[in-house]
Amino acid sequence: MLAIERRNEILEKLQAERRVVVSELSQIYDVSEETIRRDLEKLVNDGYAIKSYGGAVINENVNIDLPFNIRKNRNVVGKQRIAELVNKMVHDGDSIMLDGSSTAVYIAKALKEKKNLTLITNSIEIIIELFDVPDWSVLSTGGVSREGSFALVGPQTDKMLRSYHVDKSIISCKGVDLASGLTDSDELHANNKKTMLESGKQKILAIDSSKFDQIAFTAIGMLEDITTVVTDEKPEAKWLQAFEELGIECIYPE
């Protein structure tokens, strides 16, 4: 096993168990404890973990961007619920934008039975997923590849997105707060998401319940900039009240 593969597995274990122990990892991977310490040191330096006695704990900072393959495997059930709900909102012949989030990948998979869709995305993962879907028009935004995100970002991405007007723009984010609105951990991603919202008639925020009452590094927009929220669990009463006051439709599993 390559060192990077081992570190990714350790990171997945950290995500699942919140803490790892050097001696246990040494036995699991049949390597020295010193090798495991170097692996953990790398995860600490990258911001994914925090040193603890005999091992490490997960870094809960909302501004830390986990590798895409790790994020894609978090809260899979919640993302699938969201994808099923979004699927019911999309009609044959619609034009849509999907961002580069892991949630968007599940939405793309759920939409594959739809006919004659036009889909614009900056997600490399979604482009690959939908490459051979018949009767669809799938457009890639272009842009600069972002390490660890499987997405294209930057001014060229924004320029392409602004040249289209779609029926539905669907984005996710790292946090949503009543006062601060929609936020993300990366400025380039945030700018692209903002442009997507501006290009859609229906502006859909697809987030799992863990994103409520979180504030990340950089702003995408305010709650007033979206028309619909799709989430995996019924939000708290304060959120339902805010959505009602702002005329935002909130959709969640019954």
Image (spheres, helix red, strand yellow):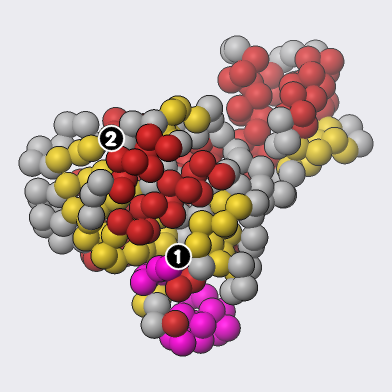
Q: Earlier in the sequence, mark 2 or mark 1?
A: 2
Quadrant location of residue 4?
Answer: top right
Residue farthest to the right? 53
Residue drawn at x 60%, y 47% as measured from the top left: 185
- Whether residue 121 appears in this view of the structure is no
Q: Position of residue 65 (x, y in %)?
A: 61, 40
Q: Which amino acid type is marked by label 1?
A: Asp
State the residue in front, 170 or 153: 153
State the residue in front, 38 or 184: 184
Residue drawn at x 72%, y 49% as measured from the top left: 60
Q: Position of residue 197 (x, y in %)?
A: 37, 58
Which residue is tagged 2? 140
Which stretch did the figure color magenta? Answer: 225-245
Q: Position of residue 175 (x, y in %)?
A: 58, 59
Residue drawn at x 10%, y 38% as measured from the top left: 134
Residue drawn at x 51%, y 86% as measured from the top left: 241
> Any mark on residue 66, and which?
none
Image quarter of the N terminus = top right
State the residue in front, 143 or 12: 143
**Is residue 120 rendered to the left or right of residue 113?**
right
Quadrant location of residue 143?
Answer: top left
Quadrant location of residue 35?
Answer: top right
Residue 198 higher or lower than 26, as above or below: below
Kindly report the distance in space between the C-alpha atoms of the residues bearing marks 2 and 1.
28 Å
Asked which secondary structure carries label 2, the reply is strand
Which residue is tagged 1? 232
Counting labels gives 2
Residue 156 higher or lower than 234, as above or below: above
Residue 164 higher or lower than 56, as above or below: below
